[in-house]
Structure formats: structure tokens, C-alpha cells
Image (cartoon, rainbow, N blue to C red):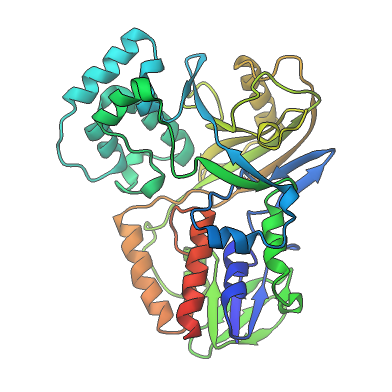
Amino acid sequence: MDLIIGAGISGLSYANFIENDFFIVEKESEPGGYCKTIKRNGFVWDYSGHFFHFQHPELEKYICKNISASSLLSVEKHTQIYYKGKYIDFPFQKNIHQLEKEELIECLYDLFTAGKHSYSTFKEMVYANLGKSIAEKFLIPYNEKLYACDLDVLDVNAMGRFFPKADKEDIILNFRSHDNSSYNHFFTYPRGGAIEYVYSLLKNIDQDKLSLNEVLQFVDVERKVAITNRREIKYDRLVSTLPFPQLLDICKLVYPDDVFSCNKVLVFNLGFDSKGNDKLNSWVYVPEKEFIFYRIGYYDNIMNTDRMSLYVEIGFSQKQEMLKEGLYLDRILSDLRKMGIITTQKLVDYEAVLMNPAYVHINKKSVETVEEYKEILEKNDIYSIGRYGSWTYCSIEDNILEARELAEKLNK
């Protein structure tokens, strides 16, 4: 029997694709992991913006097969950056022609005089490839707000394909061609929120094989016994979606103290009594430090509803102590007014969600440690998958693909 730890997207996907008998243990009172949805007072909010950017049509068809086609939205993404009181198109480096003349000249000069020296960190890579001005006007301040760390901690490829790359030719050509397409130019979203994907996956499996409110406490690796807050479970293989360092702790495997780090993100979902002025953007990036949040998303624009419905994200270092929720809410509302997003609108309802971990800090040491300990675990029939189980930065579709690939490997 395969014991699956976690009933989020990765765990449920594995359960969908595995041919062996399985049992799922989930610590929360409902499945979904971070892919949960809050529905209240006419608003539909996810724990955070969970938009599935499918690159594999057959996978999208499978994941969505139990969702009514009429309730599935195919949304063309539109994103901008709020910079010095104005909006410019994302990505920043391909739209510097939208800046004031002096700033454009600064960006072009630095772009063409950037030293092509070697680099080993994310911050060094940005300076070397795009120059000081593009780096310091957007890429450095934005990602410092997001990751809540010194960007020299991050590996060059910490964001993988999700970092919008552009060379000098791309940047110059975009002055007229306006090509801002990216890997996720279109995305799918159910009117009922991201939880509908979870419900769709659940419908394919025997739900008697899912136990909620059950917490994994210890794994006896040699005896292949998992101990929870309720019982001992004998397994043949264990498939975990827990954050990787947590799995190592539960298995009593010792690893270096400084190898795994991440940020945490406080998400405020906000519902207002009327529509706002921005009827175009899916989400907006906010690099300037005077504003507490790094990104704002518009559920009302995505779902074409008549009242402004936002998600607002604030990044913190993992060890930072949190203030009272109301203090953050007051600051958020003040900053939204300063940006002109709130004018006459009145707040009707809100929900705050803390995501911890949120974005993991990827560097050479963390990647090597994950590879080393995954090999040790797999020799004992323990597998770790998912964004946090693999301690990486990836899309939700990547998680599903990883789960399917493992199931196919183990089905043989």
C-alpha cells in the first residue's frame, strides 16, 4: 500500500495516476493544501492567486473533466507594474520605452555598458545581463520584497523559466512590436475558485481512502511504519508532499542547519462594495518600498464581476515576527488609497491567510542537498514530491506532471 502524505494537488494527482492501493493522510480538516477557496458575501477568494497555466492539453482535459465547461474561464492575462505613480507593461525590461525619457536613457546606457563578467548569484546575474538601472528600478526591489532576503542568497536559476528573459534585441524590438507574451499568457480559472480543481481530482478516487485531521508525527524508516496522531500505519511506499526539511525531521535524518530557507507570505483577500477604476489588469507588480505589498491581483477582472475583489501579497522573512492582523489591513488600505485603487469603494469583507512556507530560496547547496537526501529516501521507498516536497519553484502543472511521472515509474 502506498501511503500518501498530504491531500493537496500533488498528493491527489499521485492518487489519480497510481495503480497500486493507496491511502491519503491529510492534517487539515479539508483537502486542497494551499489550493483552497473561500466563498463569502458573494466573493470568491483563493488562499492566494492559483491560476493554472496549462502547457499540456491532455493534462488540462484530465484535471478539468469533472468541472462544468460553462464554469471554466479561459483568461487572457494582462499584467502591469505600478512605478512612480504610473502603470507600465510587464515585463519591465521589455517596456523601458514606456518610462520617462531620462529614465529610458539611463536604462539603455546601462544595458549596453553592462559588464559581461561572470556571476554566481541571482542578483549578480541581473546586474550583468540587464545593467544597473533596470536592476535597481524594478528587478532588485521587487524580488527583495517578494523573497524577503538578500538576492545574493539565491542561485542564478532560482526562478527557472519563470524569469522573463530578454536580450538587447528583444528590448529594442519591443519599442514597436509590443510582444509581452510569456509562458502563462493565458490561464484557466473556474468560477468557483481553485478548489474546483481539487474537487475534480477527488471525484476520480475512492474518498474512503482519505483521512482528514490526521497528522504524520514520525516515520520508522526501517520498519516502514508511519505514526500519526491516531495510529500506526504500515506501508510499502510512502509518498510525501510535506516541505522537504519537515519530512527529513520526521524521518530523523540529520541535515545542515543552514541549507533550507524560504519566505512567508501574508495574503489579504479584500472585497468592496463597488467596482474600481482598473478594469483591465489580472494582477499588478509593486516594486517600490513605500508600499507594503509586492503584488495586487484582481479577482473581479478575472471573473468579470461587478464589485472590486482583490488579493494583496506581503513578503516576510521566515523568522520575522508578525504584527496584529489589523495593523497590516490598515496599512494595505492606506497604500491602496495612495495608489488610487481605492477611491469611493467601501470594504465589505476580508480574509487574511498566512502561507508559510511560500517561496523557497533556491541555491546550489539546497539543490544538492535535496538530490542527496531524495536518493537516501528512495532507497527506503520514500518519495518526496510537490513544490515544497522538492523544495523548488514551479507551476501547479509541474506538480501534477511530477506526480504523474512518479506514478508511471512505480506502476511498472
Name which residue lies at 66% across and 85% down: 232
Query: Count of labels shown?
Result: 0
Front-most of residues 140 and 280: 280
For residue 363, side relative to residue 271 (left or right): left
Residue most extreme to the bottom: 223
The residue at the far top in this view is: 101
Q: Is residue 352 above or below residue 337?
A: below
Residue under the point 52% across and 32% down: 294
Q: Is residue 234 above or below residue 187?
A: below
The x and y percentages for residue 31 are: 70, 63
Question: Which residue occupies 31% across, 42% down?
Answer: 122
| Picture coordinates of residue 272, whole percent (x, y) | 77, 27
The foreground one among 172 and 37 is: 172
Most extreme residue toward the right is 41
Which one is in front, 10 or 153?
10
Q: Could you tell me which residue is drawn at 23 percent across and 24 percent down?
A: 111
Q: Where residue 370 sits: x, y (%)? A: 38, 66
Above or below, 211 against 62 in this view is: below
Query: Which corner quadrant of the image does residue 298 belong to?
Result: top right
Q: Is residue 385 left or right of residue 3?
A: left
Residue 269 visible to the viewer: yes
Report x, y in % for residue 368: 31, 64
**Quarter holding residue 135:** top left
The answer to whether residue 251 shows anywhere in this view is no
Quadrant in which the N terminus appears: bottom right
